[in-house]
Amino acid sequence: MVYARVQVGRRRFYALIEGDVVYPIIGTPFGRHCPTGQRFPLSEVRLLAPVSPRKILAAAVNYRSHLEQSRSLLGDAPARPELFLKPGSAVIGPDEPIVLPRDAGRVDYEGELVAIIGRKCRGVSPEEALSYVLGYTCGNDVSARAWQRNDLQWWRAKGADTFAPLGPWIVTYLQPSRPLLRTRLNGRVVQEASTAELIYDVAQLVSFASQVMTLEPGDAIYTGTPGTTGPLSPGDVVEVEIEGIGVLRNPVMAME
């Protein structure tokens, strides 16, 4: 299944996507739902962020190819998953602008696979963890590097408004250990890696987090970014593409 949150006129609702056709549903993907009988061309709806998460967890340094860039912040490869929180207020959807704060300095893109929790999850093992995942989407863990380096906490470096793009939709049938992830900046590929290169895979991340906090339907787990990231500038367009999901596209603008 492919689930999206869409807007038609003033109405916002969940829908199933089949090819270029949108089928609205009554309910949500996280519970019982049924089709309304309506249909719209995909080109005539506005895609929203596929979830409004209460919690966003994100994995730091979860690709070995990202170790060198992150060594000054976190040292060598982590002995366990290193997770941090991003606020739900940072979420934006496809084609919404990433807004660069006035005094943030360098702000980087970080293309990532994102797991969306489908049902209440607490204290689960890695073997059962994936059964609690509804599906997967694309994400961009936008990061203000000076704030990240100089602040005691990462609340503003990782959690500023618009710093958690998500989309374009949730794909339920994806095998998370296989897809190729690409990030493009103004059409040029700047990150490329298979999610098979994750240090801690999705099941390990979900299990580890669930030992400490209850994960709830709609919560999002950013799984980490590969390689070297780079700065964003006003006027840029950044795209995160994951094989089997699609493309999350966001323009970049300066704060007015």
Image: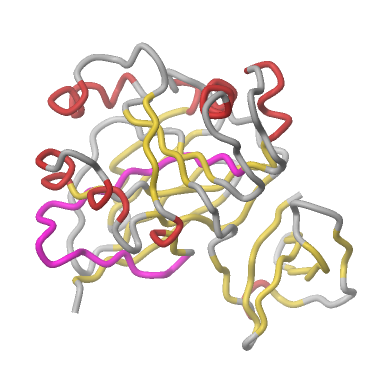
* On screen, residue 106 above or below 223: below
As for residue 136 lying within the magenta part, the answer is: no
Q: Which image quarter: residue 123?
A: top right
User: Which residue appears at 66% of the width and 61% of the height?
Assistant: 4
Which of the pair 162/173 is nearer the observer? 162
Q: Is residue 106 above or below residue 178?
A: below
Q: Which quadrant would residue 24 be assigned to in this image?
A: bottom right
Question: Is residue 72 depicted above or below 115 in this figure?
Answer: above
Of residues 75 and 38, the one nearer the viewer is 75
Q: Quadrant of the C terminus?
A: bottom left
Q: Residue at x 23, y 49 (%)?
A: 157
Residue at 64 percent of width and 66 percent of height: 5
Question: What residue lies at 65% left-to-right and 17% top-to-bottom?
Answer: 125
The magenta span reads 94-116
* Left or right: 162 as drawn, with respect to 119: left
Residue 129 in the image: state x and y as whole percent. 66, 25
